[in-house]
Amino acid sequence: MDLTNDVIIHKNIDGTEFIQFRKLLEYTNIKHCYTLKRNGINIQTKNGDKTELISSFKKIANALNIDYKSIIKPYQTHTDKVEKVESSEEIFEEVDGLITNKNNIMLCTTSADCTSLIIYDDVKKVVCDVHSGWRGTVKKIAKKAIKKMIDEYGCNPKDIITCIGPSIRKCHFEVDEDVMNVFKDKFNYTGRINEIIEKGKVINGLQKFNIDTTLIIKISLEEAGIRKENIFDCGICTVCNKDLFHSYRADKENSGRNGAFIGMF
C-alpha cells in the first residue's frame, strides 16, 4: 500500500519504509522521516535491551545517509516539557520535545498512536520534534514547543513549518465520560467543542465519546502564531493502518514504537 498523498511521500530505501513531508523536502539542509514498522523497524527499548532500537536506528540512518550516533531520543513520559539540545550525547528524562539549532544532530521522538510533530524554521535554522499524547495535547505541548523556539532562538512563528505525523484519529480515539470531560473543560473556550468531541457508541450501557486531538493540536498551533497554511497534516490514522504502523490501541502491550526524525545536515 502506497501512502503517498498531496502532503507526504511514501518511500522504501533498501527495505526501510518511511514517509516524508513534501514541504520539508523543499529544504536541502533538512533530513527527516516518520517510520513504518515493516522490515523490523521498532524505535523502542525492551526491558533495558536496546538491540532492536539500535538496529532500527542504523536502518534509518543508512536510508537517510547519516551517522546513527547523531540520533538523540528523550525518555518520554507524556509531559509538556521541551528541552534544547546542544549535543547528541545528552540524556533527557521526562521530556517529550526537543529543539536545536545545531547541525548534525538528528532529533527523534517515538509514538504508537500519539501525535508526532516535526517542526522547522528555515529563517533561524531551528528544528523541533514533539511527542504529543492525549495528556500532552491537553497540556498544549505543541504551543509550548513553539514558545520554546521563540524564547531560545528568537523564532518568528510566522516562519515555522509544522508537520503532523500519523496518529490515532477521531475515528478511533474513543474515551469514557471522565476523559471526555477533561477535554470539554479544557477546550470549551474554543467554541469548537462540537467538532472536537462527538458522541460515539454505547458499550455495556456506557456512552463512549470520540475526540479529535489533531484538531486540538492545530488550534493550539494557530494560537501560538503558526500560519494555517504552514500546518501540514498527513491525514493518516495509525489504528486504521495498524498493519503499517505500530498502534497501542490495536496491539496493546505488544505494540512497538514508530519514530519521527528531523535534523539539519
Image: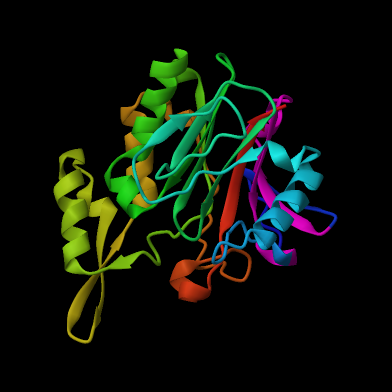
Q: Residue at x 58, y 60 (%)?
A: 45
In front here: 10 or 57? 57
How many numbered badges does the structure rendering display?
0
Q: Residue at x 55, y 34 (%)?
A: 90
Quadrant for the N terminus, please.
bottom right
In front here: 83 or 188? 83
Looking at the rendering, which quadrant does residue 151 occupy?
A: top left
Q: Position of residue 175 (x, y in %)?
A: 27, 67
Q: Is residue 82 above or below residue 11?
A: above
Q: Position of residue 144 (x, y in %)?
A: 35, 31
Residue farthest toward the bottom in the current orientation of the protein: 204
Looking at the image, residue 125 sits to the left or right of residue 83; the answer is right
Magenta run includes residue 36: yes
In front here: 177 or 259? 259
Magenta run includes residue 255: no
Looking at the rendering, which quadrant does residue 205 occupy?
A: bottom left
Quadrant for the C terminus, please.
top right
Query: Could you tell me if residue 47 is visible in this image?
Result: yes
Query: Could you tell me if residue 11 is visible in this image?
Result: no
Looking at the image, residue 261 sits to the left or right of residue 253; the answer is right
Q: Residue at x 76, y 50 (%)?
A: 58
In front here: 83 or 148? 83
Q: Residue at x 40, y 27 (%)?
A: 146
Looking at the image, residue 87 sits to the left or right of residue 137; the answer is right
Q: Position of residue 77 (x, y in %)?
A: 39, 51
The segment highlighted magenta reads: 15-39
